[in-house]
Image (cartoon, grey):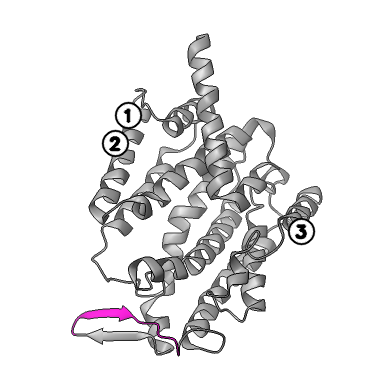
């Protein structure tokens, strides 16, 4: 590698770190506790997730967002073919793939999940919590699988724990996105139909179903809070299962699994606000708590080699 390419690669990784810090701060702080040898890979992977997760929100229309995701699909194919892609995240991923030999399968699965979601019929919603769990695993657990690979951890138990942590993290993120989607699109996109129906939120018109949330359903004690509680309970169960495995997980995996901490913080704060996702206090600091308190909690878990 010549001096110019080395300088370009350094700038590419710097871009990844900046993106993660700006758009995924709670995970940015988690990554700072990773071993130096795998930290660059983790930042590249998280930056890739930011690129794909924000594609639809940044686009002026769904077709443009889908085109961006398809561009990334082609970019991944070019990267794996050893071809240069002029994008800082793509450059960083290319280095990570070459130096850490991470699985193409997990990257592809993560992107395919985003593309499938973008191709959903307008107004369609997940049918069950299990569908949400699969989406959470495909988009969040895969990041942990890849980071474990980059860290050199080969353990079925660690992968199992990562699956649960990723599902919990993904479900929490989907719950916290409800106000944004309702404000932008005028609808709730990521509550399961069976849960919404159980709590009186599902409106059916012929073969079409839509979740409608009026002022009577909002706030503590409303139908939406009850539905959020049900999904949050599933997320909490995944965290418990992940932590039950902590005694058998290889030591090097514990820092990779630190995202369990922000997921737990978010769930605890949701519970304090009686599962009202519109409570403005949830958007303050880091998942509703002061950044200093969050950093101290994260450091305490990292110091104890726990997650």
Query: Which segment did they paint magenta?
Result: 206-216
Quadrant that contains the C terminus: bottom right
Q: Mark 3 — residue?
A: 293
Q: Where in the figure is residue 231, as x and y percent of width and height?
A: 51, 75
Q: Residue at x 35, y 82 (%)?
A: 212
* Left or right: where 95 falls relative to 294: left
Q: Residue at x 62, y 66 (%)?
A: 266
Q: Nearer the viewer, residue 73 or 177?
A: 177
Q: Where in the figure is residue 126, as x and y percent of width and height?
A: 35, 71
Q: Is residue 215 magenta?
A: yes
Q: CA distance from mark 1 to mark 2?
A: 6 Å
Q: Residue 78, which numbered label?
A: 1
By secondary structure, the bulk of the magenta-drawn segment is best described as loop
Q: Is residue 131 visible?
A: no
* Left or right: where 59 falls relative to 259: left
Q: Mark 2 — residue?
A: 74
Number of residues whose C-alpha sits closer than 10 Å to that of mark 3, classed few (under 14), some (14–19) or many (20 or more): few
Number of residues whose C-alpha sits closer than 10 Å to that of mark 2, classed few (under 14), some (14–19) or many (20 or more): few
Disc 2 vs disc 3: Cβ atoms closer than 8 Å?
A: no
Mark 3 secondary-structure assignment: helix
Q: Where in the figure is residue 7, as x and y percent of width and height?
A: 53, 17
Q: Where in the figure is residue 71, as x and y percent of width and height?
A: 29, 39
């Amino acid at each position: 590698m010549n001096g110019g390419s080395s300088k370009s690669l350094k700038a590419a990784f710097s871009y990844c770190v900046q993106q993660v810090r700006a758009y995924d701060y709670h995970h940015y702080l988690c990554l700072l506790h990773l071993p130096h040898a795998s930290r660059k890979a983790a930042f590249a992977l998280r930056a890739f997730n930011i690129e794909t997760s924000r594609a639809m929100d940044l686009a002026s229309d769904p077709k443009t967002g889908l085109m961006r995701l398809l561009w990334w699909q082609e970019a991944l194919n070019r990267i794996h073919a050893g071809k240069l892609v002029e994008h800082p995240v793509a450059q960083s991923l290319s280095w990570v793939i070459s130096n850490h030999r991470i699985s193409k399968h997990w990257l592809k699965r993560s992107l395919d999940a985003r593309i499938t979601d973008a191709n959903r019929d307008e107004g369609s919603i997940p049918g069950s919590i299990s569908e949400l769990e699969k989406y959470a695993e495909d988009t969040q657990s895969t990041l942990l699988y890849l980071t474990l690979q980059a860290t050199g951890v080969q353990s079925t138990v660690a992968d199992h724990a990562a699956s649960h942590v990723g599902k919990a993290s993904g479900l929490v993120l989907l719950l916290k996105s409800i106000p944004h989607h309702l404000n932008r699109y005028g609808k709730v996109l990521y509550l399961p139909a069976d849960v919404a129906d159980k709590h009186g939120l599902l409106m059916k018109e012929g073969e079409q179903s839509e979740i409608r949330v009026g002022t009577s359903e909002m706030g503590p004690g409303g139908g939406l809070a009850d539905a959020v509680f049900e999904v949050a309970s599933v997320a909490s169960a995944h965290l418990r299962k992940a932590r039950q495995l902590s005694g058998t997980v290889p030591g090097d995996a514990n820092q990779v699994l630190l995202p369990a901490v922000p997921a737990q913080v978010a769930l605890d704060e949701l519970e304090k606000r009686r599962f009202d996702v519109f409570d403005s206090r949830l958007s303050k600091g880091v998942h509703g708590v002061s950044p200093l308190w969050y950093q101290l909690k994260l450091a305490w878990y990292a110091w104890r080699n726990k997650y």
